[in-house]
Amino acid sequence: MFGRRAAPPSPKAEAPPREAPRPDTPAVVAAAPSPQLVPVIRPTGRAELDQRLSDLKIAIFNDLIDSVNPAELGMLDAAQVREEISDIVSEIISMRNLVLSAAEQQVVIADICNDILGLGPLEPLIARDDIADIMVNGADKVYIETAGRIELTDIKFRDNAQLMNICQRIVSAVGRRVDESSPICDARLADGSRVNVIVPPLAIDGPTLTIRKFKRDKLTLDRLVEYGSLTSPAARVLQIASAVRCNILVSGGTGSGKTTLLNCLTRYIDENERIVTCEDAAELQLQQPHVVRLETRPPNLEGVGQVTMRDLVKNCLRMRPERIIVGEVRGPEAFDLLQAMNTGHDGSMGTIHANTPRDALSRVENMVAMGGYNLPAKAVREQIASAVNVIVQASRLRDGSRKITHITEVIGMEGEIITLQDLFVFEFEGEDARGRVIGRHRPTGLRPAFWDRARYYGLDRDLAEALSESHA
């Protein structure tokens, strides 16, 4: 069979037992204990069964490594490699006369394939589409967030070394590294899911891995309306604001759905526009054909070669963008983004960590100061007021639900204060017997300041219909 070196060794010609290996990757291999020493008595307890399967997996893994040719396997795609490995493992089980039920055999094959090709014990969680976050706190504690609730799973790694190998595999796939000299790393999975890794000595109890999963079915504003995150008229107003090139900031706390909302808003950008995205770890999933994706880069081993978010924002201004999308505004790049919004790049967007629209503007002001600009506060606020048109506030409520709590416009300045007006607000009314938050999205009845912009793009009638529907 393609990719094999030779048939698995016969049980009669076995080598002296050596230390059991860690089957995380084909690069770390040692011979298994004699297969004849593997117990064949079926255990009755769950712990005994898990230990038996673990011992069998180690023995089979060693025979597998002796039977495959890595160079030839490297010429196959992942699906073909998985099929090849499954066939070889089945033959090894048969030749070793190992006592395994069909279900146990499938478990062993799946675990070995996941160890070699995937994320090991995390593969079943990655395959689930109802999980929003995977949080690994060391080898023996894996939490997930599903339906807004955090719960402990029964998934465990064998030890911290296996978990560390998985972390290194993830970050190396995007050209990054994580070790004692560089113990913090942001990365992404192939599907765009966001990954954060922090390892000892900073993480006291072992490597900590956090994965923010993206749903396979891309969310839209219409789906958010179905989930009750906002009303249909509010969603229509946001569609129009995006289409007429309003500069939009999506504000919210951690896990409030800022990136998801930003992805939803970008769907209404015209396909003929050139979009440049700047992110720490590329996770935006824009559907337009003319998109240039830029990603920051950490320093190398010598401490040089770093490319910051500010470097990306400044450079993208030379790339003739029509819209600039910043994944998260968190530092001095805020000033460069304001300048871009004020110099012909209407329709730019970004996310920012803040709890209210007013706090979002204060954070932008503070970030400008981080860049070392010695500007009067009034001058900075004037820049903000003229650059930002709409702030969309996302919140994660105490019952785990996510709501758009404010759609707020930046009107201008009164003295040294930036003037805001709410178009829609979420009013908290209480909670039901199950602890779910009850409330309603209320339109304020104010006329949007971007009305003239909507008229310019021929969408003023649609905007009027959305506002009239909200009052119905």
Image (tube, rainbow, N blue to C red):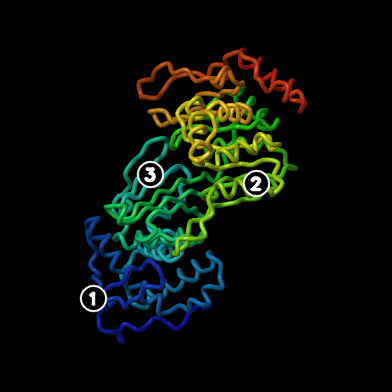
Badge 2 or badge 3: first in the primary sequence: 3
Q: Nearer the viewer, mark 1 or mark 2?
A: 2
Q: Which residue is mark 2?
A: 276
CA distance separating discs 2 and 3: 33 Å
For the point 68% across and 35% down, the residue is: 346
Q: Which mark is residue 37?
A: 1
Secondary structure of the residue carrying numbered label 1: helix
Residue type (three-letter) at the residue carrying disc 1: Leu
Q: Is residue 456 left or right of residue 371?
A: right
For the point 56% across and 24% down, the residue is: 407
Q: Circles 2 and 3: CB distance less than 8 Å?
A: no
Secondary structure of the residue carrying numbered label 3: strand
Q: Residues within 10 Å of mark 1 (few under 14, many from 20)?
A: few
Task: Please say if 11 is above or below 471.
Answer: below
| Residue 402, horizontal then vertical, whole percent | 47, 30
| Residue 375, horizontal then vertical, whole percent | 54, 33
Q: Circles 3 and 1: CB distance less than 8 Å?
A: no
Q: Circles 1 and 2: CB distance less than 8 Å?
A: no
CA distance separating discs 3 and 1: 38 Å
Q: Which mark is residue 144?
A: 3
| Residue 401, horizontal then vertical, whole percent | 44, 30
Q: Which mark is residue 400?
A: none
For the point 57% across and 14% down, the residue is: 444
Residue type (three-letter) at the residue carrying disc 3: Ile
CA distance separating discs 1 and 2: 60 Å
Q: Nearer the viewer, mark 2 or mark 3?
A: 2
